[in-house]
Amino acid sequence: MNLDMDNVEVFDAGEKGRGLRTTKDLWAGEVVFAEPSFAAVVFDSLSQQVCHSCFRRQANLHRCAQCKFAHYCDRTCQTACWDEHKQECAAIKKYEKAPNENVRLSARVLWRIQKDTGIVSDGQLTSVDQLEDHVADMLADDFKELKIDIQNFLDYCPKTRHGKEYIAHIFGIIKCNGFTLSDQRGLQAVGVGLFPNLCLVNHDCWPNCTVILNHGNQSALNTAYHSKRRIELRALSKIAENDELTVGYVDFLNVSTDRQRALKHQYHFDCTCKSCSEHLKDDLKMAAKETDRNKPSDELVKEVQEFSLECLAKVEAARTAGDFHEVVKLCRECLDKQEPVLGNTHLYHLRLLSTASEVLSYLQFFSEAAEYAGRLVEGYIRKLYHPNNAYLGMATMRAGVTHWHAGLIKVGHEMICKAYAILMVTHGPNHAITKDLESMRMQTEMELRMFKQNEHVYHSMREAALQNKPMRETRLLHQH
């Protein structure tokens, strides 16, 4: 299998080690490269809800009759995955249970290395062996977990020819380089995989590229694109020839010190990018509300921030317990307290708006959900995110759908169009969620024309439709 890597080359990125840079000018939305997974597994918690071959989440999956652990859409998926699953199937049968996802992925990686010596195509720029593991940098608790995983691996694969040091190397590589895989809609994390070329792309908190999972095109002439676990590295804006390619390892919607702490813990490096060095946008993310007449005191801001943190913890607990009405109650209470004190770009304010709008939409309180979703997007748009950031695109899409369901067709259509423009860059025209969004855009455009012709008729038809059948897009929105 050949991968097209003509757009990039490996270079010495100084203190960051190896990196990838462009060999020509790239434009916003252009696919820099695509890469199938070297190995991948479904999360333990979703092993019965997600196909172990194509990573689609759906009901009524077929279970492997041998190991009784792996699940598949149908015989086609099972047959396609058999080469990967064959050794795993025998190991699970003998072990009499499936080990955790870290052990399963490490085993798959080692079996693949043994079969293909770590290089599976001419376009693979590095062997798996050459990737960083940072085992020596692990904290005591992480190292303790590593030792447990190694012992579980040896119990799972007792005949392995690899020593503990090499097995630790593979576990370390996965911990530092594993990439989360989403379902077919890109709405939920369902597994983890290893993509060697992607591992060469260094971090920047304000990156010039984004990574998405595209489940492939089985009709493509190039068989490299037939994989159902394929990432695409896509340019977010114009990138000049010889510029380094970067992606964000952590969400930018955190202050610089928190991002640096997370990067140090997970990836063992000190981020010195411009956004961290100059603490860019930290002031917006922790902003107090200021008016011409009044500015809240530092003591009051601190008090409301502490209250917000406590409330966010309670919200998460209530959400986990499925008590959505309690979630709404807590969000309303905290948002009321934040309103006169925190700015509309403050992180704690945005997190509550996000949760409130999502849960209210799930409970079908669309008008209130639309208000919060609109404020959330406005907060994002105030230059917290890159204009082509995928999170911004998804938030704008949800806000548009929520406004649409609330009967605010004009605003809803406008937001859906904005989201579509962003996702055309971040996901591309062939991604499932972009295609869904295109359908919504066409539907809302038709409804907007109807609304402009006769508002009364439009609202009457909308109410009748809602009473008869819930919209497909409502279900999509609630999958997140």
Image (cartoon, rainbow, N blue to C red):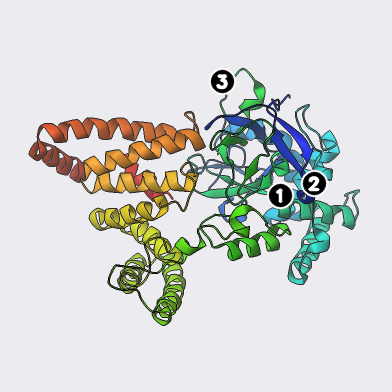
**Image disc number at residue 219:** 3
Residue furthest toward the top?
221
The 10 Å Cα crowd at callout 1, few under 14, some 14 to 19, many 20 or more, is many
Q: Quadrant of residue 289?
A: bottom left
Q: Which residue is mark 1?
A: 177
Residue at image point 63% right, 45% down: 70
Relative height, residue 91 to residue 9 (above, below) = below
Q: Is residue 298 above or below residue 414?
A: below
Compared across the picture, whether 269 is left or right of 417 comes to right
Instruction: Give me the C-alpha separation between circle 1 and circle 2.
Output: 8 Å
Q: Is residue 267 above or below residue 2?
A: below
Q: Which amino acid, mark 1?
A: Asn
Which residue is nearer to you in this view: 231 or 419?
419
Left or right of 403 in this view: 93: right
Q: Earlier in the sequence, mark 1 or mark 2?
A: 2
Residue 266 pos. (x, y %): 69, 59
Label 3: state its secondary structure: loop
Question: What residue appears at the point 17 percent right and 41 percent down from the top-left corner?
Answer: 462
What percent of the width, then of the height, locates residue 403?
Answer: 27, 47
Q: Are marks 1 and 2 in contact (CB under 8 Å)?
A: yes
Residue under pointer 2: 131
Splitting the image into 4 quarters, where does residue 149 fall?
A: bottom right
- Residue 345 image-quadrant placement: bottom left
**Mark 2 or mark 3: whose residue is earlier in sequence:** 2
Instruction: Please identify, in this view, whether the residue under mark 3 or under mark 1 is nearer the observer.
Output: 1
At x 11%, y 38%, the residue is: 455
Compared across the picture, whether 202 is left or right of 414 comes to: right
Q: CA distance from mark 3 to mark 1?
A: 30 Å
**Dot 2: within a 10 Å radius of its alpha carbon, few (fewer than 14), some, or many (20 or more) residues?**
many
Q: In the rendered image, is residue 92 in sight?
A: no
Residue 405 visible, this orientation: yes
